[in-house]
Each structure stands twice: as structure tokens, then as C-alpha cells.
Image (cartoon, helix red, strand yellow):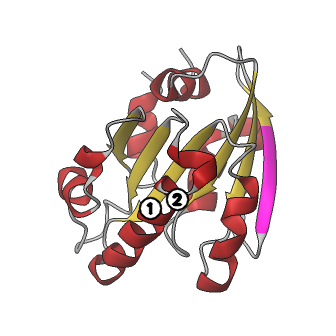
Amino acid sequence: MGLLDRLSGLLGLKKKEVHVLCLGLDNSGKTTIINKLKPSNAQSQDIVPTIGFSIEKFKSSSLSFTVFDMSGQGRYRNLWEHYYKEGQAIIFVIDSSDRLRMVVAKEELDTLLNHPDIKHRRIPILFFANKMDLRDAVTSVKVSQLLCLENIKDKPWHICASDAISDPGCEDMKR
């Protein structure tokens, strides 16, 4: 089973075409994670910070993905909500080494989960506790505790530890 098929299984996706929102604070690794999810022949060698948003389209053997890579800079976060209605799944990326901004990530997650276009939908969420290779990184279990993920009872969710650059979290999904 390929990485994208495994991802769709984790997210509980059944449709042929899926719109995924990739959210998280700036510098958390969203674009790098998306790049690693794409087929190897479609991956970019140069990753630059996303300004505003970008749209990536790619396919697995059974699904066609449209991923909205949303900038995590403070001045762009209010744009996220304009894409909530179209989103069928969410990837939320957290910099697990940035303890100071973990509170901000939690606030943004809470705002997302309480938005009227998300609150009453059973939209699946995949959390990437990214940058696990860094010395100050906290475990995915600790990230889960800091973000109070156990309180999410009305949406299917999964958290995985990752290092988007060398790919061990994403590699685990390929099996």
C-alpha cells in the first residue's frame, strides 16, 4: 500500500477526489510534509516558505488529492477559514521543538475546531508532530497532551511523529 493510500486510510477517506487543508504555524514544516506525500517524481527539491497559500494536486493509485497549503504566518491565518467548507480532511502540522509557540498552535487548533464550518462535521484530522530530529523536540505523546487532543471526541484523528526532511514519520506510513 502506498503512502497516499495509507494516508487516506488514516483519515478515513472514501471519495475519489479529496480536498485536504494543510494547516499549522509558520515554520512548522507544512510544505515539506506535503512535498514528501507527493509521488517521488513530483517532489520539489527546493522548499520555500508559503506566502498566502499554494495548491498542490497529486494522485495515488486510488485517490486524487488537492492539498491547500496554507501559510501559518499570523497575518495569513485568518484566511484559513475561507477554505473550511471545501476541506474534506485536515493535516495539522506542529513544530514539536517549538515549546514557546505550542500554546499558539493550541489556540489556532481550538479556533479551527470551534469554527461553524468545522465544528459540526466529522472531518478527519491527521496531526504531524514534526521536527522530531531536533534536540528540543517533545514526543508526539507530549504534543498530544499539550494540544489536549484527547478532548477531540467528535472527529477521527491520528498523530504521528515526523521529521519531514529525512522522512521517518512519513516512511512509517508507507508500510
* Residue ID at (66%, 85%): 75
Q: Is residue 81 magenta?
A: no
Residue 138 vertical position relative to residue 118 in the rendered view, above or below:
below
In depth, the one of 50 and 118 nearer the eye is 118
> Horizontally, is 75 left or right of 90 in the view?
right
User: Which quadrant holds residue 158?
Assistant: top left
Question: With respect to residue 74, does 132 lie above or below?
Answer: above
Residue drawn at (71%, 14%), measured in percent from left and top? Answer: 62
Q: Is residue 170 visible?
A: yes
Q: Are marks 1 and 2 in contact (CB under 8 Å)?
A: yes
Q: Label 1, label 2: how many angstroms apart (C-alpha)?
A: 5 Å
For this rendering, which residue is in front, 16 or 77?
77
Res 53 → quadrant? bottom right
Q: Residue at x 47, y 69 (%)?
A: 108
Tag 1: residue type? Answer: Leu
Quadrant location, the C terminus: top left
Question: Label for residue 118?
Answer: none
The image shows residue 148 at horizontal and vertical percentages of: 25, 56
Q: Which residues are magenta?
A: 53-57
Can you identify the residue that label 1 sits on? 109
Measured as percent of width and height from the top left, residue 85 is found at 72, 46
**Label 2, residues with CA under 10 Å away: few <14, some 14-19, many ≥20:** some
Where residue 162 appears, as percent x and y from the top left, is 38, 50
x 69%, y 37%: residue: 40
Labels in figure, total: 2
Taking the image as drawn, is residue 165 in sight?
Answer: no
Q: Disc 2 designates what residue?
A: 112
Indicate the amino acid at tag 2. Leu
Depth check: give the residue in front, 110 or 63: 110
